[in-house]
Image (spheres, grey):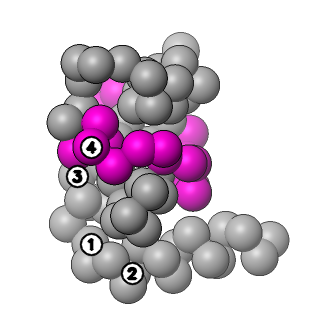
Amino acid sequence: MTYTVYILTCNDNSLYVGCTNNLEKRIQQHNELKSGAHYTKIRRPVTLAHSELYSTLKEARSREAELKGWKREKKIALIKKKTRR
């Protein structure tokens, strides 16, 4: 199983970092479910801005925590770097 660490862009241009083993389903949940992440629920719709794959949950959670600790500018630089490739 692979795990994805992702960054979403919310409707208000804020960023949300998360981790999942089913990215497509998780984005759908962020956009449609009444329950779930309160942060994205009130900032819909959200779109995928960046994703990274990891082979273990431990690696993915570690990276998720790292990204959550970054300032917005650093996250945006990561997103821009990936989209230029």
Of the pair 35 and 67, the residue shown nearer to us: 35
Of the pair 67 and 27, the residue shown nearer to us: 27
Q: Report the residue marked by disc 2.
A: 74
Along the polypeptide, which appears first: circle 3 or circle 1?
3
Q: Amino acid at mark 2?
A: Lys
Query: Dot 4: few (<14), some (14–19), or many (≥20) neighbours within 10 Å?
Result: some
Q: CA distance from mark 2 to mark 3?
A: 14 Å
Taking the spot 39% from the left edge, 81% from the top edge, the residue there is 74
Of the pair 84 and 16, the residue shown nearer to us: 16
Q: CA distance from mark 4 to mark 3?
A: 22 Å
Q: Position of residue 56 (x, y in %)?
A: 41, 27
Q: Nearer the viewer, mark 4 or mark 3?
A: 4
Q: Position of residue 49 (x, y in %)?
A: 57, 57
What is the number of the mark on residue 42? 4
Q: Report the residue marked by disc 1.
A: 70
What is the number of the mark on residue 15? none
Secondary structure state at the residue bearing disc 2: helix
Q: Is residue 41 located in the magenta-colored stretch of the structure? A: yes
Of the pair 50 and 62, the residue shown nearer to us: 50
Magenta segment: 39-58
Residue 51, can we see it?
A: no
Q: CA distance from mark 4 to mark 1?
A: 22 Å
Q: CA distance from mark 3 to mark 1?
A: 9 Å
Quick check: 85 left or right of 13? right
Q: Report the residue marked by disc 3.
A: 65
Secondary structure state at the residue bearing disc 3: helix
Q: Amino acid at mark 3?
A: Ala
Query: Dot 3: few (<14), some (14–19), or many (≥20) neighbours within 10 Å?
Result: some
